[in-house]
Every structure is written in C-alpha cells, then in structure tokens.
Amino acid sequence: MSSNRNTRTKTDVLSLRFNQDSSCFICATCDGIRVFNVEPLALKCFLGVGRTTYAEMLYRTNLIAYVLADYAPGLASNVVNIYDNQRKTHVLKLCFKTSIMSVRMSRTKLLVILMNKIHIFSFPNQCQLLHTIETKDNPKGLCELSNNDGSLIAFPFNTKSKGGFIQLLYGLSNDL
C-alpha cells in the first residue's frame, strides 16, 4: 500500500488562528472556513467558499476576513474578503497588485501583509488606508497587532534601516 504525502483532502488545514480573546478559533481549509467555539468546544459555522489560504475573525463578532488560494474559483489571492456571517454577505473587498501573505484585525484596524509591505486601514467603519509600511521580504506574513486598540504592531525588521531584527510601531492613529 502506498500513500502520497502531497495529496490534499477537503479538511486539510491551511491556516489556524485564535480570535483576539481566545474564545474561538478559525480554520482555513481546502473547502472553506470553519469557526469553532472553545468553551464548550463546538463548530459555530462553516463557510463553503472554497480553498482558503488564510482566515481571521474579529473577537466574537460576525466579521471574518479571508484570502482564497490563487486557483480557487471566484476570487484571487490578492483580494481580502470581509464577510459578515450574521448578514450572510460580503461587506468589503480590498484588492492588491500582489499576493496577500496574511491579515490581522483589531477593533480599530485592519492590517494586510504583503511580501514587502504592510497596509494599515481604519476598520471596521469607513475602511480607509491610513499608512503603508515597507518591510523586508516577508513570505510567511509575520506580523502581530495588539488586541486592545491596535496601536502596537510588531513585524520583521526592514533591512533598509538600522536596528534590530523586529520592528515595533506604537501609537498609530486613525488620522490620514
């Protein structure tokens, strides 16, 4: 009997994240998105959106950000989709010229991490681009956003500047 390690099933997990207060976690899989409650452990919802490379949820709210795989039918990997699970509709799409590595959300900010940039948007009301930060190549989409008001951001150091290996930005306002 032979097996192929590269064979993907519908339930293969492609990304896995806790929400900001660790009361839920979200799984991006080959057939969509699954949101689980932690206490008690239970499936809260399933979104059959196709092969999803990345998903993030905002606390226990109904807002889910996700990025589909390049070859998924419908939307490409350069589009962040914000889905309102209560209204059962997409409420926002943000398109970029390059593939999205990851996404982070707080109550006041949405971060879209590309290979060598981080775009910071006001969120969820009146989503507007606030800042763009150039970074070193970041194929893993490494970036963290503080859970409080989203005013602290940590990401890999930009080698074009002097300093250490992690950059911290503090106090980013929602002013344009």
Image (cartoon, helix red, strand yellow):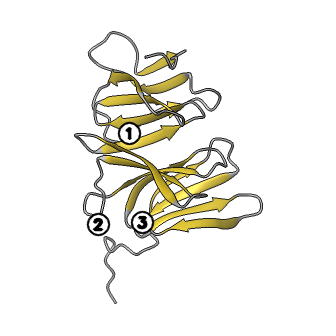
- Disc 3 to disc 2, how far (Cα)? 9 Å
Front-lying residue, 126 or 42? 126
Q: Which is nearer the N-term, disc 1 or disc 3?
A: 3
Q: Which residue is mark 3?
A: 49
Quarter of the rendering containing residue 116: top left
Compared to residue 93, the image places residue 30 above or below, namely below
Compared to residue 136, the image places residue 68 above or below, namely below
Quarter holding the C terminus? top left
Q: Residue 129: x, y in percent?
A: 39, 27
- Element carrying mark 3: loop
- Disc 1 to disc 3, how far (Cα)? 22 Å
- Disc 2 to disc 1, how far (Cα)? 23 Å
- Element carrying mark 2: loop
Between label 1 and label 3, give the one nearer the viewer. 3
| Left or right placement of residue 61 versus residue 77 in this view | right
Q: Which three-letter amino acid code belongs to the residue tagged 1?
A: Gly
Q: Which residue is mark 2?
A: 73
| Residue at horizontal 40 percent and vertical 75 percent from the top | 9
Q: Which residue is mark 1?
A: 141
Q: Which three-letter amino acid code belongs to the residue tagged 3?
A: Val
| Residue at horizontal 61 percent and vertical 54 percent from the top | 25
Q: Residue 54: x, y in percent?
A: 42, 52
- Element carrying mark 1: loop
Q: Which is nearer the N-term, disc 2 or disc 1?
A: 2
Between label 2 and label 1, give the one nearer the viewer. 2
> Number of callouts in the render?
3
Quarter holding the N terminus? bottom left
Residue 123 numbered tag: none
Q: Residue 17: x, y in percent?
A: 55, 50
Q: Residue 96: x, y in percent?
A: 27, 40
| Residue at horizontal 54 percent and vertical 37 percent from the top | 124
Q: Which three-letter amino acid code belongs to the residue tagged 2?
A: Pro
